[in-house]
Amino acid sequence: FRPGLIYNPGIDRYMLMISCPHTEWKWFFNDNPHRASYFAVYESENPWGPWSEIVKDRAWNTDEDRFQPRIPSKWISADGLSFHLLYSCIPRGPYQFNIHQCRLKLRK
């Protein structure tokens, strides 16, 4: 589904966010209420890769239909280590606006 790519100047890396199904999937919730999806973030020095995985959450889509993760560039801290993740979801009603604060820990 709609991957998101952002440049994080604080860590001098491109970050790619994806959310994908990892089982049989149907679009409408009523047709497939227990569908599963995962969320992953990758990093690279270049916007074309090669990519290294930062995190993969295989249970990202629990009781909600979460999709289209984004990191707005204005919501990245100056050091690049914290940011806000923006995504949409449909828990059991209309689309909702969701924000999660995230923090990176750099490997040496």
Image: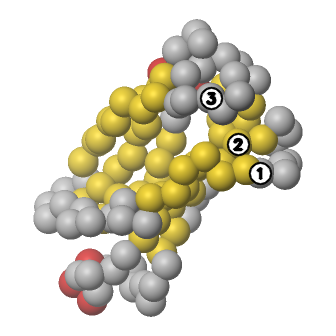
Q: CB of mark 2 within 8 Å of CB of mark 3? A: no
Of circles 2 and 3, the one toward us is: 3
Query: Tag 1 or tag 2, which sits nearer the N-term?
Result: 2
The x and y percentages for residue 61 are: 33, 64
The amino acid pointed to by label 3 is Leu
Residue 7 seen in the figure: no
The amino acid pointed to by label 1 is Trp
Alpha carbons under labels 2 and 3: distance apart: 12 Å
| Residue farthest along the front direction in this orientation | 108
The x and y percentages for residue 67 are: 41, 58
Position of the N terminus by quadrant: bottom right
| Number of residue marks | 3
Q: SS of the residue at dot 3?
A: loop
What numbered label is drawn on residue 98?
none
Residue 1 vertical placement versus 75 (above, below): below
Q: CB of mark 2 within 8 Å of CB of mark 1? A: yes
- In which quarter of the view is residue 105 placed? top right
The amino acid pointed to by label 2 is Glu
Residue depicted at x 42% and y 32% = 102
Asked whether 31 or 59 is in front, the reply is: 59
In this figure, which residue is indicated by the disc labeled 3?
Answer: 106
Position of the C terminus by quadrant: top right
Q: SS of the residue at dot 2?
A: strand
- In which quarter of the view is residue 8 placed? top right
How crowded pointer 1 is (Cα within 10 Å; few <14, some 14-19, many 20+) is rated as: some
The x and y percentages for residue 99 are: 33, 36
In this figure, which residue is indicated by the disc labeled 1?
Answer: 51
Residue depicted at x 55% and y 22% = 81
How crowded pointer 2 is (Cα within 10 Å; few <14, some 14-19, many 20+) is rated as: many
The x and y percentages for residue 21 are: 48, 75
In this figure, which residue is indicated by the disc labeled 2?
Answer: 43
Residue depicted at x 46% and y 29% = 103
